[in-house]
Amino acid sequence: MEVLREKVEEEEEAEREEAAERAEWARMEKMMRPVEVRKEETTLKQETLRDLEKKLSEIQITVSAELPAFTKDTIDISKLPVSYKTNTPKEEHLLQVADNFSRQYSHLCPDRVPLFLHPLNECEVPKFVSTTLRPTLMPYPELYNWDSCAQFVSDFLTMVPLPDPLKPPSHLYSSTTVLKYQKGNCFDFSTLLCSMLIGSGYDAYCVNGYGSLDLCHMDLTREVCPLTVKPKETIKKEEKVLPKKYTIKPPRDLCSRFEQEQEVKKQQEIRAQEKKRLREEEERLMEAEKAKPDALHGLRVHSWVLVLSGKREVPENFFIDPFTGHSYSTQDEHFLGIESLWNHKNYWINMQDCWNCCKDLIFDLGDPVRWEYMLLGTDKSQLSLTEEDDSGINDEDDVENLGKEDEDKSFDMPHSWVEQIEISPEAFETRCPNGKKVIQYKRAKLEKWAPYLNSNGLVSRLTTYEDLQCTNILEIKEWYQNREDMLELKHINKTTDLKTDYFKPGHPQALRVHSYKSMQPEMDRVIEFYEMARVDGLMKREETPRTMTEYYQGRPDFLSYRHASFGPRVKKLTLSSAESNPRPIVKITERFFRNPAKPAEEDVAERVFLVAEERIQLRYHCREDHITASKREFLRRTEVDSKGNKIIMTPDMCISFEVLEILKLREEEEAAHTLTISIYDTKRNEKSKEYREAMERMMHEEHLRQVETQLDYLAPFLAQLPPGEKLTRWQAVRLKDECLSDFKQRLINKANLIQARFEKETQELQKKQQWYQENQVTLTPEDEDLYLSYCSQAMFRIRILEQRLNRHKELAPLKYLALEEKLYKDPRLGELQKIFA
């Protein structure tokens, strides 16, 4: 039995081992199958990842190397105020509200990007974006309107690209720091511009959205420069003159109609070919100017300013790009979407679909369906209700409860942590960083300079090119300021080499426009004048190498036109200038306006001097009842007058043209290009500066004399004695002792006063410390912060008083000895010098 039991146990053990072996194989086989599946899945994921990395590596984000860097490491924060480095309890509360608002938004809209609510400032302190706005009205009238404000921000700051074009910046600096360093990204630009616009009374908002590649990179090479756009000229329709009844019929046209039709067909074919060529050329240029497809289109983050209609008589909503200062319609294709916007009072999230960019957006910020606001209690927090919607809340209790609920939930925006935005007159005048800025447009380049930076007064230059590569110059326009010769604009046409100078009123020769190719005399030129500033009423003078034409207005002799023809200059053996060898006048034609004080037959209309033929022809105005005008002709027969005296021609008897004088003056002005300086410009006006320094020097000397008179230590004691009486030895000793005793007492009183203040501050600090020990358990964190702040300030005052007292103790004996020495040397106490002689 025992052997049988052992055999059975052996068989059971073998079966268990076999079952365990089968189970182990099954487990191993089961484990092997998932490993192979995991390997396949891992391989698939790796291939997908490599493919994604390859596609991402093909996307290149080019950032110009010339763009400046502007990081917190380049900012000096040592002198910034406390509001930049800490948050007030109200600001901390606002940050908590913003975090709660962000969490709810992320929960309800998990597919949208995180909100741009509280980025770090230059001191690494989180600040809510609305409190970064500081509404400020600038003291300059030029910055009162939105267009001048936007242009100033565009000129004054240098653009810095966002570190990541797909995300808003992690830091948002204050406008004071941005103005100090004159750099910033699109959010810095928008914050400064929005602060200035709100301060000027506009309903302006900062926008966080998405823009095109050109907008984000401030690339204007595909936009036309505004200065090159010519205003549309209104074409006046010519009124058809109705034919009169007795009008003479024109002669019969004997030309061949067939030839005319053939000529018309030929001209039509030529025009069609020209139109085709122009259309092909335009298509080629459009293809060359077409922007390359942007791989990040619709994803590039950008910030701009939204101005709503209503305030400041703004008729409709519009956008302002702070980089360029240009305004755009809310339908413009450069703006691809909006995430949120804010002003100094509230923050709104766009809940509308931006599939069609910003073209379909409705900017009714009071509509909670389209715009989700963060804070209650603002002027646009709720949509205005209609009469039908208002019928359901007529119950007074409901209205009262609703008002209480809103009152409990309302939270006012804290005041801005940014200091007052200030722009010095020097910075406002300089405008651009380092006084110069260059903007590249489509086939144009605009250069700007600060006034007085260039010695010739040049402040702006626009260069227009023929090609997109900006190599062939078409024309140049230069604007000037503060010129003594009143030059305002110089236009140079490189195709015709024609130069045109425009002057403001005030030129010595009353010049208004001067068009020329060369400053040399006897060349083609046109000169226009301010006729009201000239005695002769000259309006315009046109000159060619052989002719000169002048136009007049408002002359007492009614002269309106003068035309002079010149002949070839007579050759001389000696070298002579144009002044010493003038061109001979061949003919002079003068025309006159009608003089109503004279009869028409006696009023000269045209006078012609035929110098070579020695004749004068006169034509008079025609009377209303006459068909032809009267004419007269004078012939030169003798060189003596009616009395028989010989006529000698002198320069006083001839009319002189001051063209050479004007050209000589213009050459001197172009060589000197002296600038005018206002008498109110104390920085550049040397005469005013010298006069001011002399006055300041006189005032300083007068102040020193007054101080010296006030510090006369013997004056109070000498006033006790009769005036003019000579002091005796006893009186001199007594005055000296009284003066020293009085000075000693004042030193002691001052020490006692400092000591009393020191003891008072110490006692108050001890009382405050004792109060803190008694109420330490029940104090709130705010009370502890106030206590620590008080202790810090009190210890500072105590240390200052202690230093003053020690310094006073050290200097008091020295001051006493110095006064004693002065008394011994004072000439009014001469008896003292005799005693110690």
Image (cartoon, helix red, strand yellow):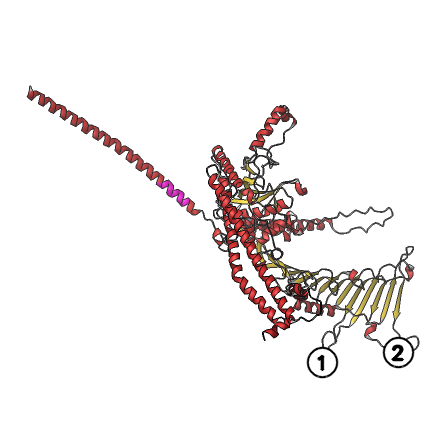
* Rendered image quadrant of residue 649: bottom right
Q: Which residue is mark 1?
A: 574
Q: Residue furthest top?
A: 1
Q: Position of residue 568 (x, y in %)?
A: 74, 72
Q: Which residue shows up at 11% across the image and 23% down it?
A: 9
Q: Nearer the viewer, residue 305 or 330?
A: 305
Helix, strand or loop at mark 1: loop
In the rendered image, residue 324 lying in the magenta stretch gets the answer no
Q: Which residue shows up at 64% across the image and 43% down it?
A: 202
Q: Say whether disc 2 or disc 1 marks the residue closer to the N-terminus.
A: 1
Q: Amino acid at mark 2?
A: Lys
Helix, strand or loop at mark 2: loop
Q: Amino acid at mark 1?
A: Thr
Main SS of the magenta part reads helix
Q: Position of residue 52 (x, y in %)?
A: 40, 42
Q: Residue furthest front?
A: 730
Q: Which residue is mark 2?
A: 646
Tally of marks: 2
Question: For the C terminus, which image quadrant?
Answer: bottom right
Between the residue at mark 2 and the residue at mark 1, the CA separation in whole angstroms equals: 31 Å
Q: What is the magenta range?
A: 46-55
Q: Nearer the viewer, residue 417 or 496?
A: 417
Q: Position of residue 778 (x, y in %)?
A: 48, 36
Q: Is residue 27 left or right of residue 574?
A: left
**Mark 1 Cα-neighbour bin, 10 Å: few <14, some 14–19, many ≥20:** few
In the rendered image, residue 53 lying in the magenta stretch gets the answer yes
Q: Nearer the viewer, residue 749 or 311?
A: 749
User: Residue 465, can we see it?
Assistant: no
Which label was assigned to residue 203? none
